[in-house]
Image (spheres, coloured by chain):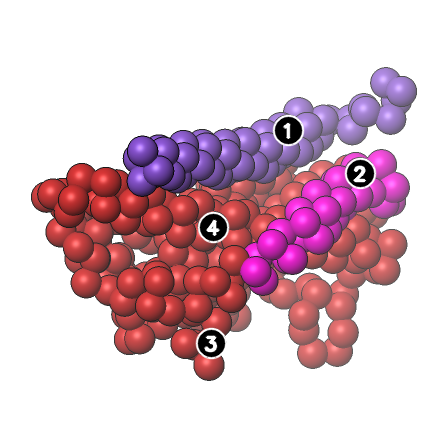
Amino acid sequence: MFSYFANPERFQNLAKWLVPPLAVLGLLGIVIGFGAGLFLTPADYQQGDAARMMYVHVPAAWLSSFSYAFLAVASLISFVWRHNLADAAAKAAAPLGAAFTFLALLTGALWGKPMWGAYWVWDARLTSMLVMFFLYLGYMAVRNIVPDEARAARLAAITAMVGAINLPIIKFSVDWWSSLHQPSSVFRTGGSAIDSSMLWPLLVAALGYTAFFGWLVLVQVQTELERRKIARLQRRLTGGRVSRPENPQRSVSDG
Amino acid sequence: MVELLDMGKYSVFIWTSYGVSTAVICGLMVWILGQRNKTKAQLQALEAQIKSETSS
């Protein structure tokens, strides 16, 4: 199955089809979600207008964890089956995941100040999210610091896989420890605790964020494939007189 | 209009949240699409160079 999807030609054809609808869905979802969150939804009966920050905070927090799960699975596939496309997908997910984790932390802090009285508390949920942000930075640092690309990919994959232990900690931190952060309000037994007038913009924004992520991951993988093609053509032009070591991972042209 | 934008005592927190989120989303888009266009142009130039070298 992985071989089927790891074929670069098949990927490029699939990406050509998927990129436009994902771009439209992503941007529309974000614009509608933000607009509705700011101007259409009612203010919360306790938090007032401060609850409007939920529409930028919650989708960013969900996407940051989803993105890490994506990074860890892609790293596992790249590590075990040595598929270059999985490696390119993992590499693409890291900066997006880091950006959305940063947004989740920042918007959470901006909500925390008026609601909790502090921008930051060393709460289990907040701390595990901060750890995830550092894991993303660590992943990107490994990829940039290690000069040999194949070695960098394998080391970064190990970092991503080990860091996946943080995902259940983030999810269950509000249940395992006494926490200032509220427990899950949307996906919980007994149904969502949020009124439908406030739930739909949240779900639309979350869908928009996820489509946006998918769009930009695909674009980055396309870019990475082109970069590798450029490197191959340059080697051909110079008659193979390039000192950079050949990537021992399966060549993109092998599929 | 001003009334619509006024979020009371939470205005600064709300507008900063939405402003930074929009800036980061736009920044990611510009950065990633910019890289794609640059690489695409580089690849086309290289392919044109190879074509002209092989035909000459």
Side of A198 relative to A68 (left or right): right
The label on residue A35 is: 2
Chain of the residue that carries numbered disc 1 in the rendered image: B
Residues at marks 1 and 2, CA–CA distance in whole angstroms = 12 Å
Q: Which residues are magenta?
A: A13-42
Residue A162 position (above or below residue A58) = below
Other residues around mark 1 within 10 Å, as few (<14) / some (14–19) / many (≥20)? few
The label on residue A230 is: none
Nearest the viewer among A21 and A133 is A21
Q: Secondary structure at mark 1?
A: helix
Residues at marks 4 and 2, CA–CA distance in whole angstroms = 31 Å
Side of A110 relative to A85 (left or right): right
Q: Amino acid at mark 3?
A: Tyr
The percent position of residue A205, horizontal first and vertical second, equals 71, 50
Chain of the residue that carries numbered disc 2 in the rendered image: A
Q: Decide which of tag 3 and tag 4 comes sooner along the chain.
A: 3
The residue that label 3 is drawn on is A4
The residue that label 4 is drawn on is A222
